[in-house]
Each structure stands twice: as structure tokens, then as C-alpha cells.
Amino acid sequence: MQTQKLILVLIAVLSCAVTSAQKIALKNNLLMDAMASPNLSLEFKVGTRMTIDIPASLNLWSFSDTKKFKHFAVQPEVRWWLCQPFTGHFWGVHAHYASYNVGGIGPFKTIKDNRYEGWLTGAGVSYGYNRILAPRWSIEATVGVGYAYLSYDKYPCGKCQPLTRHRTKHYFGPTKFALTLVFLLK
């Protein structure tokens, strides 16, 4: 239910934006696609050298009772471009929120043998570069570091397993890594 409310708020905010030529970009993170996580981002020009990027991903995959890779994530970011928006170098400040239910998959033993259900929130800074490929198309690489507060429950894999532990965690490190295909709307 919280996820649905967050999506509705995001749609309402995006629909209020003023649009004009080359002031909005529709984007897709290819690295999230590689992890089978559908994602979409809209970036709005809000100043001479500033934009607001709002990426979101939603994954509802359940492979079996023991294998899950479900999440909803959003990571809005304010960007300051060194030259002009949607081309060249930029610096950003981002926030992030995600809810997740993951387990029974991956190369790491702890995630393969357990299921983690919870949420995270935090913030960070990023650096990126956007290279123009064609008049409306470009590719963008972004990396970021920051902080995340996690709250989760841990369960053994299997159907209807009892809660093993509830935990909160403070994380400092990489918070953003994207290779994004960008289409400028006119």
C-alpha cells in the first residue's frame, strides 16, 4: 500500500512540471535492466545549469517460494551541470528510498540461504557525464557515494519460515551506479 501511495505522489509531482523543448529527458538505466529490474527516469531542467532527475524502479519477480527479488526504489537527485543541462559533466545530490523482499538468489551465501524484507533511506553525492550520441539521444554514466539507514527482518529461505532477527544498519559507501540511455523530449 505504501508503494502505491509513493507512485501516485511521484506521478502527481511529475505531471505538475512545466514542459518545453529539450527541457525533459526520458531515461532508462541499462544496469538495472541487466538485473531484470524495470526502471524509468524523468529529468527536468529547472534552471540555467540545474536539473532534477527522478528515477524509479519496480521489480515484482518471485521465482518460487524460496527465490525472490522484489523491490521498489526511488532516488531523486538535484544536478548542477558544468556547462549546460543534458550534456557534459555534472555533480549531484541525491536522496534514496527503497522497500525490498530479497532472498534465495545470487552468489552470496547469506542472500542465497536467507530472505531479507525491509526498507532503506539515505542520501549521497554523485558525479556523472552525459555524452551526446544523436540530436535526441545520449548515454550517461553516474557514480555516487553516501549513507543509507536500513531496517530489515531476516528469515531462513523456505515457505512460512519464522523470523530469525530484526536489525537496523548504518551503511556508508557506494549508493549510485548507473549507465543510462537518455532520450530528450521536444
Image (cartoon, rainbow, N blue to C red):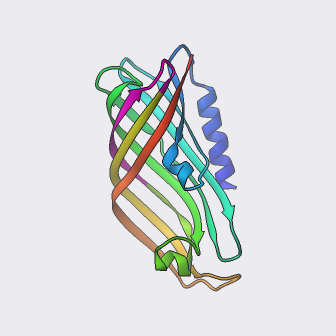
Question: Farthest residue toward the front?
Answer: 133
Question: Farthest residue toward the top?
Answer: 21
Q: Nearer the viewer, residue 174 or 47?
A: 174
The quarter of the picture where the C terminus appears is top right
* Drawn side of residue 114 relative to residue 82, left or right: right
Where does the image place residue 19, in percent across and percent down from the top left?
A: 57, 18
Question: Farthest residue toward the left?
Answer: 82
Secondary structure mainly formed by the magenta segment: strand
* Drawn side of residue 105 relative to residue 179, left or right: right
The quarter of the picture where the N terminus appears is bottom right
Tell me what residue is drawn at x 64 percent, y 36 percent. 11
Tell me what residue is drawn at x 52 percent, y 70 percent. 106
Q: Is residue 127 part of the magenta span, yes or no?
A: yes
Tell me what residue is drawn at x 43 percent, y 45 percent. 178
Where does the image place residue 149, in percent across and percent down from the top left?
A: 42, 62
Q: Is residue 75 part of the magenta span, yes or no?
A: no
Where does the image place residue 42, in percent across and percent down from the top left?
A: 54, 33
Q: Quadrant of residue 13?
A: top right
Where does the image place residue 145, in percent across and percent down from the top left?
A: 32, 51
* Drawn side of residue 31 relative to residue 14, left or right: left
Q: Nearer the viewer, residue 106 or 22?
A: 106
Q: Count the labels in the image.
A: 0
Q: Quadrant of residue 168?
A: bottom left
Residue interval drawn in magenta: 122-137
Q: Nearer the viewer, residue 152 or 26?
A: 26
Tell me what residue is drawn at x 57 percent, y 63 percent. 100
Q: Quadrant of residue 158?
A: bottom right
